[in-house]
């Protein structure tokens, strides 16, 4: 069994764990063939054959094998998909969206009236010209519902834009500084005999002394995952 990607018209249609039979056809783990049928009426007819397990009555061209198929599907592993022109284009598109998302910033413009707790905000590419962002901020204020501070001047709005851009530009340096400070803190703890198992200077009294910071990292990760999944932690 392996995970198979099925794509149509250059886009992934589904990803499923599948079994490749001796004749090369791809089947789901529930025992049904991976088929490609686009005609609505034919799809209903074939669905009935699948439901009744009359697989031999299904036209051969509807079955899916690895690679390009007459039924319009392409099938293969994720690694194979990434080597295709469509897969490479999709990967480039995802990377481009990720790069664009890095430029997205939210600027708080105003609160709203009683009973509406959603703020009036602008969100967009902070690297765009100030004049464009200013016009869009002005539009948010003027067209927004029950906005408290519509009367802000252009200078006030430009101040918000410039401050937001400065914060965005300084984010990489702040992240690097935090990482450096965290690394220095971990090293100080190691040097001073800190126990990462019980997270104190227990001098081995806990019975499970560890100077490996990964112990604490794994514990914190486990706790975070438990809180996210169940809304609890393992501290009791």
Image: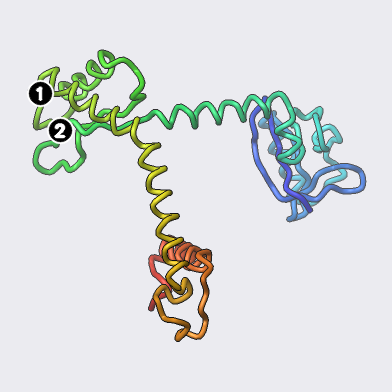
Q: Position of residue 123 (x, y in %)?
A: 31, 29
- Residue 220 vs 33, above or below: the answer is below
Query: How many residues crowd mark 2 within 10 Å: few (<14), some (14–19), many (20+)?
Result: some
**Displayed quadrant of residue 174:** top left
Residue 107 relative to residue 224: left or right: left
Residue at the image position 26 percent from the left and 28 percent from the top: 122
Identify residue for label 2.
Answer: 110
Residue 203 relative to residue 121: left or right: right
Residue 205 relative to residue 50: left or right: left
Quadrant holding the C terminus: bottom left
Residue at the image position 76 percent from the left and 36 percent from the top: 80
Ranked by sequence position, the earlier of labels 2 and 1 is 2
**Displayed quadrant of residue 86:** top right
Query: How many residues crowd mark 1 within 10 Å: few (<14), some (14–19), many (20+)?
Result: few
Q: Position of residue 192 (x, y in %)?
A: 42, 70
Identify residue for label 1.
Answer: 152
- Residue 98 vs 26, above or below: the answer is above
Instruction: Give the SS element for disc 2.
Output: strand
- Mark-to-mark CA distance, 2 and 1: 9 Å
């Amino acid at each position: 069994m392996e995970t198979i990607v099925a794509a149509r018209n250059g886009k992934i249609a589904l990803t499923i764990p599948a079994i490749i039979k001796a004749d090369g056809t791809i089947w789901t783990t529930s025992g049904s063939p991976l088929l490609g049928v686009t005609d609505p009426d034919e799809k209903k007819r074939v669905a009935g054959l699948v439901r009744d397990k009359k697989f031999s009555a299904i036209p051969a061209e509807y079955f899916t094998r690895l690679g390009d198929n007459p039924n319009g599907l392409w099938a293969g592993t994720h690694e194979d998909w990434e080597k295709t022109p469509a897969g490479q284009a999709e990967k480039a598109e995802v990377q481009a969206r990720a790069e664009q998302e890095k430029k997205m910033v939210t600027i708080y413009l105003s609160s709203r009236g009683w009973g509406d707790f959603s703020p009036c905000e602008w969100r967009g590419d902070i690297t765009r010209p100030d004049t464009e962002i200013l016009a869009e901020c002005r539009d948010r204020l003027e067209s927004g519902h029950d906005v408290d501070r519509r009367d802000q001047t252009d200078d006030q709005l430009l101040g918000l834009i410039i401050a937001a851009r400065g914060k965005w530009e300084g984010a990489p340096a702040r992240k690097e500084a935090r990482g450096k400070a965290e690394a220095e803190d971990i090293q100080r703890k190691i040097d001073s005999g800190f126990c990462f198992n019980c997270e104190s200077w227990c001098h081995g009294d806990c019975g499970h002394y560890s100077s490996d910071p990964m112990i604490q990292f794994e514990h914190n990760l486990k706790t975070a995952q438990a809180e996210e999944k169940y809304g609890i932690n393992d501290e009791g």
